[in-house]
Image (spheres, rainbow, N blue to C red):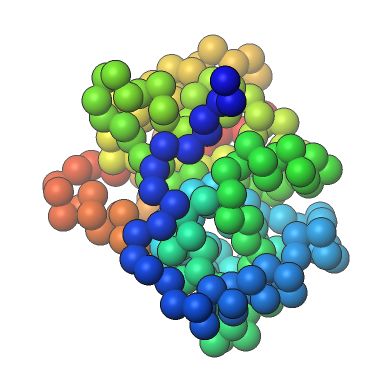
Amino acid sequence: MKQKFYFGRVKSRKISKIKENSFKNFLKKNNINKLKNKNKLILEIGIGMGENLIYLSKKNKKKSIIGVDPFINGTVNVSDYCINNNVRNIYLYPYVFQKFFNKFKELRFKEIYILFPDPWPKKRHQKRRLVNEEFIKKILKRLKKKGKVFFSTDNISYYENVKSILKTISKIKIKKLKKIITIKTKYYLKAEYKGNKIKSLMFYY
């Protein structure tokens, strides 16, 4: 049986044909294979509606920002913004991260962001969580020297689980972050509205 990697929706609102075609053209023009400077890469896995990805592109204009997410509405939203605002340093991969890592094995990153991944709060669903031991070991292999991974969630169980996994991996340095590591995205505001405390970690070799 084929392993299932993604359990969420890949689309919510209907996307117009015009935006769909623009998105396809954007992917051709901003093809990850065409990246010129592979020494300055930032990766975000699970971009939501893309607010943080756009923020990162503004903050790091001389770096290439790659967003990986099978949720089409979010990636289309980002491509639409890039087209309308002439943003040239964003690249999108609208599939699961496992496919991305298998396809682009040579890429290494200075920073990797995983912000507010689906917490799958019910105990029977927690095996669906994106950030597990296997995932962490895979992304650590893709870090450049002195590269860093940033993780944020408003689910305490998820946070503690990730922290406990990290403690079992040798030579990993873990830092609890007090400062906000992102702008107030849709999911950040959702957590804030619910009164949930947002917890963040940075980890690296």
The answer to whether residue 128 is left or right of residue 26 is left
Q: Quadrant of residue 36?
A: bottom right
Q: Residue at x 63, y 37 (%)?
A: 98
From the top left corner, tell me how far across and down residue 28 is, in percent: 73, 70
* Quadrant where the image shows the C terminus: top right
- Give the vertical position of 85 relative to 91 (above or below): below
Q: Nearer the viewer, residue 123 or 150?
A: 123
Task: Judge from the rendering whether residue 107 lies leftward or rightward of residue 200; answer left or right.
Answer: right
Q: Position of residue 7 (x, y in %)?
A: 42, 37
Up-down relation of residue 123 to residue 177 (above or below): above
Q: Nearer the viewer, residue 76 or 60?
A: 76
Q: Percent from the top left, x then y, of residue 197?
A: 23, 42
- The image quadrant that residue 159 belongs to is top left
Residue 175 visible somewhere in the drawing: no
Q: Residue at x 59, y 69 (%)?
A: 57
Residue shown at the point (52%, 82%) measured from the top left: 18
* Residue 14 seen in the current view: yes
Q: Position of residue 172 (x, y in %)?
A: 61, 23
Left or right relative to 100: residue 128: left
Report the residue at 48% width, 60% height from top.
Answer: 72
Numbered marks: total: 0
In the image, is residue 199 above or below residue 110?
above
Quadrant location of the N terminus in the rendered image: top right
Q: Nearer the viewer, residue 119 or 15?
A: 15
